[in-house]
């Protein structure tokens, strides 16, 4: 046995013998920290080993030492001096069931790192290795000061290893053991906040630790807290093949080698005294399980004792499940009541009653620390101030130092409180805060918390909607959000003058960060005064003059010089949030009437119309905003330009270029990433869409649209469990909306969860903007299974609901959705009738685009050709019109003319866009249409393999196609393709049968079904 191992075994052996026999099992289980090899060695010696004086000569220990050496595969001193990847191994730091750790030198970067070689179980199991590598790479992305950084994952001689940050200091376990007393409250809070910061970042990245305990918390020599082995506990959780992670085993059941719920050597789901109730019950833990374990750590730091104890592991587990810990303040009278409340909430046994996120727990800890700091005796602060000012030279130094410390960094966030209107002139209500936000958001330096985020925090605090964000309420929101600055403003009358006053304070310490005051002689000059005060405040908060000059535009130009127009716009924004898009239209229209040059009002109205599927009005207003973009600041210019390129012109290349420049200029603005993600979605680049949206949500965790999109994008890439979990998170954060529910409906369809689909459909009943959308979703689902009668009824309901809400274009699109379905099912006359009505209802560009395709599929080739030519002239820059729709229309025309080779040639242009979603917002059943038409053309050419390849795309991309009826018709296309090839009748029959199985309840008179049955009967 190696010297370090001898010392460790001996140390634990003696320590165990000093404890009562009834306590040895629990002590050793905890002391070995999950190292089952070490636990087995020491437990054997305690039970059967020699007395301490014969320890070194023990034959039993020698045998155990040999067993351990063999289990490590020689991965010890022979590694020292070797080069692993680009690391030179210097010496060994330790070893155990979790592997062997070495100090090494990074030969590329010249730094020292820790190399951890993982247990053999990881390297010998390909599935476990792949899973470990995937999650290790995820953990390596957790670049945060309170998480031990993983630099690299690799393999050396078939042994997986991690290169990690090398730390110097001690574990929290050592710190608590050395103190033998509760930690001081100020130090406890400092450690706790740093731990919680690390957990918050990891949980938001979808990674749970699942083994939070003092031994996995490291405190460096500089008092920085690092969470160790993040992601490894989750990755290394293991069960026997075929068993469920949620398999139940009674807590007092004996551990046996064959128990599938047990872990392999060094592979642990948690440590007995720090497990959550769900871990004890062998249920699937989640992020809230980490918070329970963290609550145990908090309790131990505050009291010096663990809350759940017992003489055996089973007794500890029973305590976790059944017992309520002794009140914390009974064990330590220095514990503040608020800290006890925080710990109690973290230790709720039902995870639904527990803290639901580390972010909320973190805000409570920060708020407590801030309150305790403000409670320090004022006398002490005064004495400190007198001591500093005693010497003039020192006074000057500290003045400069204090002035610098008041400045914000780029990472600090600012909560903008509501303006206090002391004039009693209602015109100033809400307007000045909006103007101030517009000015501050131009800054590339300052980071202003969104109104959505502050409103959400108010809801977490139990405040009703519309609660003014002023005074102590604003301060508490600032503290809970972890922001550094709170900016308040007021307007008052001084004689005939108006006085605009701004004040910033550090909401954590109550220190002033600066103030600014400006006066206006007349009401119409107030915005100018506010503008000057805001510019002064930007400088006082730390922004450099060059930065201010580069990103400055007057409020009157960025918004409007008209207070009345700005007020109408502000009411429109509030109404849109509270009542939806349609209710906001009159306010934005009024703002434009009051100021016909109000660029951002045109842009807002255009976006509202687009969400309402009124694309003609959307395009008109976005064009007006684009023409006026020279009047706005840099940030608004990005927004207006990007949305004009994307929604008015459909030019995805220009839009994406603008989004990327927007991101480079304002990297903390989540909106650019949200919209770039949508562009990738439209192009069918779903992995990129997912990446951008996850990044956006990191920047703005309160973004309802990011949550909505994320559910859909997770579904598109086949990560259905994550899609469902994201949906639940959005609901928990009060971000309910029709699009979110629609994406959940699609997830439920892909999972075959009819009950969940019914729940979402029931939710939409009677809700404008949702009722019609879900009725159309249901029509597609019915059509997917060939139930054409019910599909028609649901389409009719969708049209009627949209018309009832005054959304003519939406109603027309639902008719076109039905028309395309009828066309592909072989009901040409019905398809033409639906198309005619839709065009009469709303002949917009999108409606005419889909109508042209319907004409091409039902024999109206001349009309389709004419409409396509008009579309090409009207939309020369529209990416999806020119590279998805027009190739599909022209290809369909050539198929109708029985010129399949020409059709294939024309459809080639759509290949890069096949997987795209050509019209986000309104789900016309057009997924993979170019591929479907290409398959039809290859069938006419008699090319079996190429036809089959096109139809196979629908099966391969099932998560994209979802309930689009083409997904079921593609099975028939496969059968027809196989039937063309000699010797493939078996495969052809199988494909036909798969189609018939999907359509087992189909309406019997559908033309394409009748034709399919005839074809099947004629197969050899």
Image (tube, helix red, strand yellow):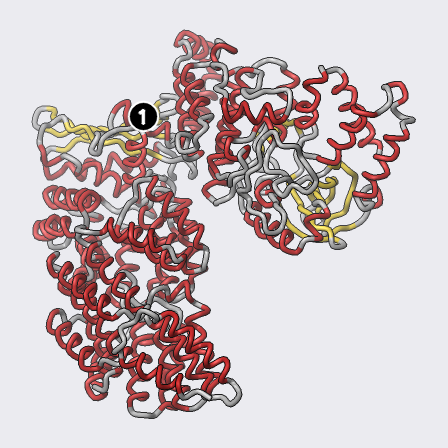
x and y percent of residue 623 in the render? 20, 63
Q: Residues within 10 Å of mark 1 (few under 14, many from 20)?
A: many
Q: Residue at x 61, y 45 (%)?
A: 238
Q: Nearer the viewer, residue 750 or 485?
A: 750
Q: Is residue 324 above or below residue 891?
A: above
Q: Residue 329, position in %: x, y?
A: 47, 12
For the point 34% across and 29% down, the residue is: 478
* Count of labels in the image: 1
Q: Residue at x 15, y 72 (%)?
A: 838
Q: 375 and 320: which one is in front?
A: 320
Left/right placement of residue 699 relative to residue 786 reads right
Q: Position of residue 646 (x, y in %)?
A: 29, 63
- The quarter in which the N terminus is drawn is top right
- Decide if residue 400 is in sight here: yes
Give the labeled residue for mark 1. Answer: 475
Q: Is residue 362 visible?
A: no
Quadrant in the rendering for residue 732 = top left
Relative to residue 684, is residue 865 drawn left or right? left
Q: Secondary structure at mark 1?
A: helix
Q: Is residue 788 left or right of residue 934?
A: left
Q: Is residue 905 above or below residue 471?
A: below
Q: Position of residue 98 (x, y in %)?
A: 69, 39
Please name whichever residue, 34 or 84, is drawn nearer the observer in this view of the structure: 34
The answer to which quarter of the image holds residue 596 is bottom left
The residue most toward the bottom is: 898
Horizontal side of residue 469 vs 524, given as left or right = right
The correct choice, above or below, for 939 with respect to 822 in the image is below
């Amino acid at each position: 046995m190696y010297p370090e191992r001898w010392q460790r075994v001996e140390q634990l052996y003696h320590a165990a013998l000093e404890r009562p026999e009834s306590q040895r099992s629990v002590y050793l289980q905890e002391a070995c920290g999950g190292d089952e090899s070490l636990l087995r060695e020491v437990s054997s010696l305690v039970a059967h080993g020699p007395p301490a004086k014969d320890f070194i000569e023990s034959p039993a220990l020698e045998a155990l030492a040999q067993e351990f050496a063999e289990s490590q595969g020689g991965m010890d001193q022979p590694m020292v001096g070797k080069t692993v990847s680009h690391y030179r191994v210097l010496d060994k730091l330790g070893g155990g069931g979790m592997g062997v750790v070495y100090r090494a030198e990074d030969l590329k970067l010249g730094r020292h790192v820790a190399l951890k070689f993982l247990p053999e179980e990881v390297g010998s199991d390909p599935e476990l290795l792949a899973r470990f590598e995937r999650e290790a790479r995820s953990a390596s992305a957790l670049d945060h000061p309170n998480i031990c950084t993983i630099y690299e994952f690799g393999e050396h001689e078939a042994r997986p290893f991690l290169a990690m940050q090398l730390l110097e200091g001690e574990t929290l376990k050592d710190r608590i053991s050395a103190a033998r007393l509760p930690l001081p409250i100020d130090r406890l809070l400092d450690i706790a906040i740093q731990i919680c910061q690390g957990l918050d970042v990891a949980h938001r990245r979808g990674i749970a630790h699942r083994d939070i305990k003092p031994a996995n918390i490291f405190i460096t020599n500089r008092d920085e807290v690092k969470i160790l082995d993040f992601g490894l506990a989750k990755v290394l959780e293991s069960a026997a093949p075929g068993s469920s992670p949620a398999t139940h085993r009674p807590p007092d059941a004996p551990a046996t080698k064959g128990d599938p719920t047990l872990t392999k050597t060094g592979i642990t789901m948690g440590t007995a005294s720090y497990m959550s109730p769900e871990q004890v019950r062998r249920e699937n833990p989640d992020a809230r399980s980490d918070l329970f374990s963290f609550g145990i750590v908090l309790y131990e730091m505050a009291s010096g004792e663990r809350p759940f104890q017992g003489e055996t592991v089973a007794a500890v587990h029973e305590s976790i499940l059944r017992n309520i810990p002794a009140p914390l303040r009974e064990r330590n009278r220095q514990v503040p009541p608020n800290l006890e409340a925080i710990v109690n909430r973290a230790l709720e046994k039902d995870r639904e009653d527990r803290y639901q996120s580390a972010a909320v727990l973190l805000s409570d800890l920060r708020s407590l620390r801030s309150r305790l700091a403000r409670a320090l005796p004022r006398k002490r602060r005064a004495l400190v101030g007198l001591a500093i000012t005693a010497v003039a030279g020192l006074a000057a130094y500290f003045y400069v130092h204090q002035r610098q410390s008041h400045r914000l960094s780029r990472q600090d966030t600012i909560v903008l409180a509501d303006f206090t209107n002391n004039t009693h002139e209602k015109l100033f209500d809400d307007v000045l805060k909006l103007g101030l936000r517009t000015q501050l958001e131009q800054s590339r330096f300052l980071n202003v918390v969104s109104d959505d985020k502050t409103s959400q925090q108010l809801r977490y605090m139990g405040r009703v909607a519309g609660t003014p964000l002023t005074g102590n309420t604003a301060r508490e929101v600032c503290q809970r959000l972890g922001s550094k600055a709170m900016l308040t403003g007021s307007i008052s009358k001084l004689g005939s003058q108006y006085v605009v006053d701004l004040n910033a304070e550090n909401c954590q310490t109550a220190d002033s960060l600066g103030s600014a005051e400006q006066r206006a002689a007349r009401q119409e000059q107030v915005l100018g005064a506010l503008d000057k005060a805001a510019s002064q405040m930007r400088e006082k908060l730390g922004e450099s003059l060059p930065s201010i000059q580069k990103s400055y535009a007057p409020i009157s130009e960025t918004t409007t010089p008209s207070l009345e127009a700005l007020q109408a716009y502000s009411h429109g924004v509030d109404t849109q949030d509270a009542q939806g898009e349609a209710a906001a239209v009159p306010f934005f229209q009024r703002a434009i009437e009051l100021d016909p040059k109000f660029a951002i009002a045109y842009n807002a109205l255009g976006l509202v119309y687009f969400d309402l599927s009124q694309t003609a009005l959307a395009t008109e207003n976005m064009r007006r905003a684009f023409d006026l973009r020279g009047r706005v600041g840099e940030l608004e210019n990005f927004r207006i330009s990007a949305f004009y390129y994307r929604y008015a012109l459909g030019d995805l290349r220009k839009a994406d270029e603008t989004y990327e420049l927007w991101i480079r200029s304002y990297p903390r603005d989540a909106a650019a990433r949200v919209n770039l993600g949508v562009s990738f979605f439209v192009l069918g680049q779903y992995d990129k869409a997912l990446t951008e949206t996850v990044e956006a949500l990191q920047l703005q965790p309160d973004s309802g649209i990011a949550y909505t999109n994320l559910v859909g994008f997770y579904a598109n890439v086949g990560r259905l469990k994550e899609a469902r979990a994201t949906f639940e998170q959005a609901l928990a954060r009060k971000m309910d909306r029709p699009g979110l529910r629609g994406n959940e409906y699609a997830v439920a369809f892909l999972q075959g969860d009819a009950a969940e689909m019914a729940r979402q459909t029931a939710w939409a009943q009677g809700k404008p903007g949702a009722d019609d959308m879900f009725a159309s979703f249901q029509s597609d689902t019915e059509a997917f299974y060939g139930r054409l009668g019910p599909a028609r009824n649901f389409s009719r309901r969708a049209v009627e609901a949209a018309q009832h809400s005054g959304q003519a274009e939406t109603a027309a699109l639902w008719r076109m959705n039905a028309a395309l379905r009828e066309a592909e099912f072989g009901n040409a006359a019905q398809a033409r009738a639906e198309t005619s009505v839709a065009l009469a209802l709303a002949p917009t560009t999108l409606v005419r685009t889909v109508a042209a395709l319907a004409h091409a599929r039902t024999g109206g080739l001349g009309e389709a050709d004419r409409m396509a030519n008009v579309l090409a002239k009207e939309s020369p820059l529209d990416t999806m019109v020119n590279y998805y729709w027009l190739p599909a229309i022209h290809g369909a025309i050539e198929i109708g003319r029985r010129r399949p080779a020409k059709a294939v040639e024309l459809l080639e242009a759509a290949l890069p866009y096949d997987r795209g979603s050509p019209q986000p917002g309104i789900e016309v059943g057009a997924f993979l249409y170019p591929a479907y038409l290409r398959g039809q053309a290859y069938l006419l050419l008699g090319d079996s393999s190429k036809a089959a390849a096109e139809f196979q795309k629908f099966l391969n991309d099932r998560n994209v196609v979802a309930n689009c009826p083409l997904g079921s018709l593609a099975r028939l296309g496969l059968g027809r393709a196989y039937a063309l090839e000699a010797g493939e009748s078996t495969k052809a029959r199988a494909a036909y049968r798969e189609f018939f199985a999907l359509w087992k309840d189909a309406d019997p008179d559908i033309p394409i079904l009748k034709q399919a049955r005839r074809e099947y009967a004629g197969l050899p």
